[in-house]
Every structure is written in structure tokens, then in C-alpha cells.
Image: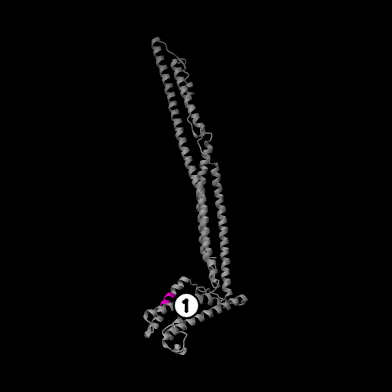
Amino acid sequence: MSRHDNTYEELFDKLGAKSAELQARAQEFLSQAHYVDNSGRIKTLERMKIWIGLSLGQFKELLSEFVDHRRERAEHVLAVLDENGIATPPKRHNWIDTLLATMPLTLFEGVIVGALMALDGLMSVPAGLSFGFIFALVNVVTGMLAGYFTLRYARYKANGVNLTPQDKRIQTQGKIGFYALLGVLVLLIFVAARVRATGSHEAVFSFNEISFFQTVNNATSIVVIVIASASSFVAIIKGYKIDPIIGLSAAQEFATDSINSDVEVFVFDTDDMITDRIESVLEDAYAALERIEDVERKRADGLAKINNPRREFNHEIDVAKNALIARQRHEIDRYEKIKGVKIDPIPDLGLEVFDALKLPLISDADYSDAHEGAAQAIELRALVSELEATLDDARNKIQVAHTQYRATQPNLSPTQEPKGV
């Protein structure tokens, strides 16, 4: 058998055609894009890391401004106390607690006055109780109004020094108002005593039958006067203690609950703003990583479809070469037996041309974009991890700063040491 044998040439042509087909298939596969360009996304992640740092710095600056504002507001509270000549701020009472506290007083006064009105049959029990409850309600409400709207102003900067004309004018107006309401209370109590003395409200100011002296000389009427006066006094004090120092409660609210509420909103908004923006960027990065994995998986599948036929083809060439060698050996043996002649040397079949048909396996190194795509994938994954860690660190720092802010308390009293400052 020689290189010019028809079987040899047919086999070579057949394998050559198959080699060309496999090379064309590989070339088509390699010409396709096998990576996702993430250069823009990588730049975005890098910018986001810087943006978090800038946002965190701005947050700390603004929180520091809140601390300064709270200190200034606390200084205003101290100024109000100093203007009023008070060292320790009085306890504040809100309207709801005060009203709840005065309800038993109103009921007690209503029942006692109502019972006294019905005593000795001067009034029916329903009429006496009705009068008692209405009188008690009007008495308590008027007393609280007198305490809150007039006595507080009458005592405006009562312990203060160097009062301005405006301060004195406020005191005077408060005293006038207080005395006016006090006169209303006195009149109201006197009317109750007269109703008890006369048994009716129709002749309250008629002293023909029952004189003024007989009114205050009546034991039952005196009890009415004492109970009503005591109730009025308690109601005045209750109203006054709701906010005894004018402007103090507003200043205290401004220096504590108000600014603390603003800080709560500021911290929440900052955390929410940073988290939402970074999570949006990270979601896009996660989707890109999924696409990268999908492309890598498809590329691996494509490589397998290219390389597996190549392995089979290369093996087929080896099999063909071995078959040609075996056939030559068989023909030489047969010839030597017939002719009785030893063939030496054995003719060269030139099988190296078959080796030239073998195809190398394709790897990532054969891609023009393989190195860049792999480098981008590695960098993107690293930046995603770094950005996640940076976000967690920023949120922790925000919460720590907020905790430190809440742990510090401004000085709202000359006798109080500031807490945590």
C-alpha cells in the first residue's frame, strides 16, 4: 500500500473535509460575543461606594447641627427659668390628666351640694342633685380657667428681677383678669348659698324675706360656701399648675420632644434614602451577575459541543492511521510469503499528513474577549461584596450616632448636670 492508494486518498479527503467542517463550526462559535460588558456598571458601583461615604459625612454634619440646636434650645429654657427667678423647673401637667383629676372633685362637690339643696325638703332630690352637678361643673371649670388664663399671667416672672415695662403690664393684666374671675366665683358661690337659704333661684337677690346676714348665718349655707370655696381653690391651683411658667413648657418641648422627633425623622429618612438607592444599584448588579453566570454556562455548553466532536475526530484519525498501518503490514506479509523476498525497509506511508488534520481543543484563551470578560466578572463580584459591606457599615454608623444622640441630654435646669455631654 502506498500514499497514492485510492483508499489512502479517499480516507484523507474524507477526514480533511470533516476537519474543515469542524473548524468552520468552531470559527462561527468563536465569532459570537460570549461575555456581558459590565464596565459601566462597575463604574457605577465604585461611585456608589464614594457616595455612601459622602452621604455619611453629610449625615454626621447635620446631626451635629441638631445637637447644636438642641443645646441652644436648652439654653433658652435656662434663660426662661432665670427670667422667672426659678432654679428648678416646676412639674408640668397636661390638660387631660388635670381634667381626669378634677372629675372626682366635681362629682364629690355635686353630690354634697345637691344633697344640701334637697335637705329639709327645700328642693326635690332630682332638682337638688341637678343643681348641685351643674353648679359644681361651672365652679370647677371657672376655677381652672382662672388658674390657667389669669393667675399664670398675674404671677408672670413673679420672682424675676429687672422686670421690663412689658413684663409689668402682663402681670397687671393677669391680676385684673384673675380678680375678675375670682369675683365671678364669689358671686357664683354666694348664689349657691342664697339658693340654699331661699330654697329657690327666683329670689336670689331679694333680701326682703331672708336677709344677707341670714344667708351667711345659716349652717347649711355656710357648708355650701366652704365646700364650693374649697373646690374653687383646688380648681384654680389645678389650672395654674398645667403650665405655671409662661413660655417654659413650649421651650422645654422645643428643646426635647420636638427636636428629638425631628431627629427621628431625619435618621429614618437618611437610612431609607441610602438603603433604597444602594439596594437599587445592587439589584441591578445581582441581575448582571446572573446574566454573567448564564453566559458562562452557555459558553461552557458551547465549548463542550465544539470540543467533544474534536476529541472524537482526533481519535478517529488515530484509528484511521492504525488501520492503514495494519493494512500495510498485512500486504507486506502476504507479498513476502508469495515472493519469498524480505521487504526492507518498509515504505513510509507519510501518515504525518493525517496528524496535521487533528484539531486542538478550544479554551477560554481562544476568545478575544475572554480575559476582559473574566476580569470584569471578578471585579463586579468583588465590588458587589464591598458595596454590601459598605452599606451595612454605614447603616450601623447611623444607628450608633443616633443612639449616642439619644444618650445625651441637654441641661434643662441650673441644678442639673448635663447627661452624656
288 is higher (above) or lower (below) than 134 = above
Residue 177 in view (yes/no):
yes
Residue 365 location (% of width, % of height): 51, 34
Residue 219 location (% of width, % of height): 42, 88
In this rendered view, identify the residue nearer to me: 319 or 379.
379
Find disc 1 in the rendering and name its residue.
235
Q: Say whether residue 181 is magenta.
A: no
- Furthest residue in direction top, as rendered: 339
Q: Which portion, as a residue range, is magenta?
A: 102-107
Q: Secondary structure at mark 1?
A: helix
Q: Which residue is at a point 57% across and 64% down the rendered structure image?
A: 69
Task: Quadrant for residue 123, please give it.
Answer: bottom left
Q: Give the total number of marks visible in the rendering.
A: 1
Q: Which residue is at a point 56% across and 54% down the rendered structure image?
A: 55
Task: Quadrant for residue 307, please give it.
Answer: top left
Residue 268 location (% of width, % of height): 51, 57
